[in-house]
Structure formats: structure tokens, C-alpha cells
Image (spheres, rainbow, N blue to C red):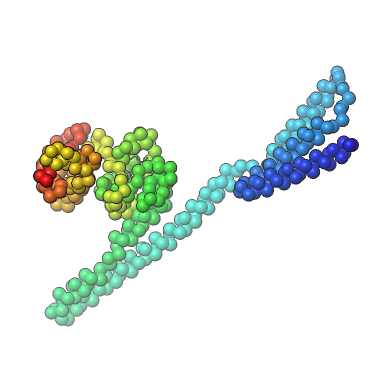
Amino acid sequence: MTFMKIILKKGVVGIVVGGILVALAKALAFPPVFQAMFFTYAMLGAAVFILLDAPPVKPVSGVKALIALVVFYAILSVVYVGGASLWPQYDPEVEKGKIAKLLKAKRAKVLPERERLDESLRQAEALEAKLRSLTARLNRLAPAASPDAGTFADSLKPTSGPMTLVARGQEVYDLYECYNCHKIGGKGSVKKRGPKLDNIGSLLTIEDLKKKVLDPAYLYAEGFEKQHKKGQMPDKYKDLMSDEEVNALAAYMSTLKNPAVETPRPVFLKTQVEHGFIVYGYVRDRLGKPLPGVEVKATPLKKHGHAASAKANEQGYYEIFIHLHNEDAGVRIAVSAGGLQKEIVANYDPNDKVAKRQATVDFMSPS
Ligand code: HEC
């Protein structure tokens, strides 16, 4: 077989193998760059096999050999550098452009919605003002009708106010991609980087939620101490979010009250013990056997005191976190479980910023 024939034969094999590789790469959804690369590899392979069959070269020596070597290197360098520069190059500007485009689409989606909201709010306010002036006129004309007019006006007050704030908060949550690390309703964070937030509204006040977003060091989720120390939750939202966004986000999160999904209890850092009080203890029967599953409820007996509850675990142990601040020292707390009621006093020193604030309450069921 002449060398020409060998080149033809092996060249064809190379093309066929290259074609198969490209088809495979396509089926596996490799980008075109990779498809071309695989084809080139097949052709390079064919070239190596062709060289194996190439007729031997006359041996050279001395200065000739040296020149031949230098020429060979020169050719190889040109092929390498030239070939490499033919490949598509990575350009950070192009990547930045792509990101900017994505962001622009997102902003374009959000902005008109915000304007629409603002617009309907303005309309609602204008309507309300009109209604007030009409009611006032009505009262002047026919004072007897005023009580009715009053309730009528009340009934027309926009009830959608808080709803839209919450919807806006959900939008902010999505916009800042909190879902990359957190789960709500089973959605988000496949890698389980941060805690589930389904019940966060029962654990944190709006004020505390705002503080956590603006300063992640403010508190940490129990069981996530390591991630907290590493500073995994980004400390950038205070620079990126407007007040309006933070308020809406906190309002939205405060509505997340699904006790069925375990949300880790917030642990306020040593300097911040002044935000919570823990009631803990055991629920047992007469013989001292634990009573798992019994719900224990703790209610601070003060104005706007939020009750909180927890279920006793296998050992009958429960722990309830309630919101009490410095000024609440000495407040009474009603603790109840399975029809039993107890009352304790939250005693702590408002000036002590280190000691944990807690009290233990055990229950013994009579049955
Ligand atoms: C890169 C991952 C990451 C992102 C993004 C992130 N977080 Fe977090 N977040 C965490 C981690 C980890 C924790 C637990 C450690 C800690 O509390 O610092 C946490 C804790 C929290 C907690 C306390 C939960 C509890 O049970 O006490 C809240 C509330 C919270 N994040 C809200 C948000 C909000 C709102 C956003 C979006 C603006 C957000 N996070 C974005 C990682 C993240």
C-alpha cells in the first residue's frame, strides 16, 4: 500500500470516529466548542497513526540535525500558539454583559409592578379623602345619618394594605435570592446551606427579622453555629436593600408561622440575651414516665405579649422561646400543658447581658 493510500484510509477512519464523537457529544448536550474539540482530537489521533506508517527519514547529523530541530520547534510553536488562539476566548466583559442582561430583565419585571402598587395606593388614598369630605358634607346636611355614614366609610377602608406589603416582601425575598440558602414551603436551597424559615414568624419579631437581615451577626439559628461563625449568610443586604425593601421583607417573614416545619430557634449572641426568655422543663405522668407530644404553651401576661408553644419530646422535655426584652423583667408568664396551668415570674437582671434568661417549669399529669 502506498503512503498516499494509508493517509486516505486512516484519514477516513479519523473522520468517522470524529463524527461518532460529535454525535455523542451532541446527544449529551456538550456545547459546540467541545464538539469541535472532540473532532479535532480524533483527527490528531489519525495523524499520529498515519505518522507511524510514514516512510523513514534519512538520518541527519551535525549542524543539519541542529537546524532541523530548531525548525521543528519553530513549526510546532506556530501551530500551538496559532491553534490555541483560534479557539473561542473567555472574555469577562461578555460574561458581565450576560449578567447585566439577566438583572435588567428582573428589574424591568419588578419596577412596573411597584409603580402599579404605588399608583393604586395613591388612588385608594384619593378615594378615601373624597369619601371623608363626602361624609363630612353628609353629616352637615343630615346629622342623623352620621353613625351609618361612619361605618360605611370604615367599611371602605382599603383592606389590601398589609396584603400588598407581604406580597412585596415575598418579591424582595426572591429578588435577593434568599432561596439559595433557605427553604420555605419545601422550595429552595437544595444544598441545605441555611435553615428552613417556615416557622420563623413564630420565633422572631419584625424588628429582630430586620436586624438579622441587616446584620447577620445579630443572632444565629440553633444548630447552625458553625455556618454562623464562618459568616455564611452574606453581610451585604444593609448596602443593597432600601428601607422599604427591608420592611416588606420582614413583614413577609413575620407571616411565616407553620409549626409543622421545624425552624431552628434563634440564639441571640451573648451581648443580645436581652431579647428572649426560655421556659423549659419536663411533662411526666404520676409515675415519672415522660409524656411525649403534649403541647406546652407559655403566654407572657402583658400587653401585646405573644404566646409561644412547643411539644414535649420523647423524654418529655420541652423548651419554649418567648420574646421578652429588658423592660419586661418581672413580667408574669402563664404556662399551661394538658389542662394544667402554672404561673411564673420572669426574673432577671436587665443589666446582665451575659447570663441566659430562663426558668424551668415541670408538669406532672394527674392521670
Ligand atoms: C449564602 C447563604 C445565605 C443566604 C443567601 C441567606 N442566608 Fe439567611 N442564613 C444562612 C445561614 C447559614 C444561616 C444560619 C446561621 C446564622 O443564623 O447565621 C441563616 C440564618 C437566617 C435567619 C435566622 C433563622 C433562624 O432560624 O433563626 C434568617 C431569618 C435568615 N437567615 C434570613 C435570610 C434572608 C431574609 C435572606 C435574603 C435576604 C437570607 N437569609 C439569605 C445563609 C444564608
At x 20% / y 78%, what residue is drawn? 137
Where, by quadrant of the figure, is residue 112 drawn? bottom left
Q: Position of residue 204 (x, y in %)?
A: 26, 47
Q: Nearer the viewer, residue 158 or 346?
A: 346
Q: Nearer the viewer, residue 302 or 283?
A: 283
Q: Nearer the viewer, residue 345 or 12?
A: 12
Q: Residue furthest bottom?
A: 141
Q: Position of residue 126 (x, y in %)?
A: 30, 70
216 versus 73 height, above or below: below
Q: Is residue 276 left or right of residue 93?
A: left
Q: Is residue 15 visible?
A: yes
Q: Residue furthest top?
A: 62
Q: Position of residue 6 (x, y in %)?
A: 84, 38
Report the image quarter containing ligand 1: top left
At x 32% / y 37%, what residue is drawn? 223
8 versus 62 height, above or below: below
Q: Is residue 346 visible?
A: no
Q: Quadrant of the N terminus?
A: top right
At x 72% / y 43%, what residue is drawn? 18
Q: Position of residue 287 (x, y in %)?
A: 13, 38
Q: Is residue 341 left or right of residue 177?
A: left
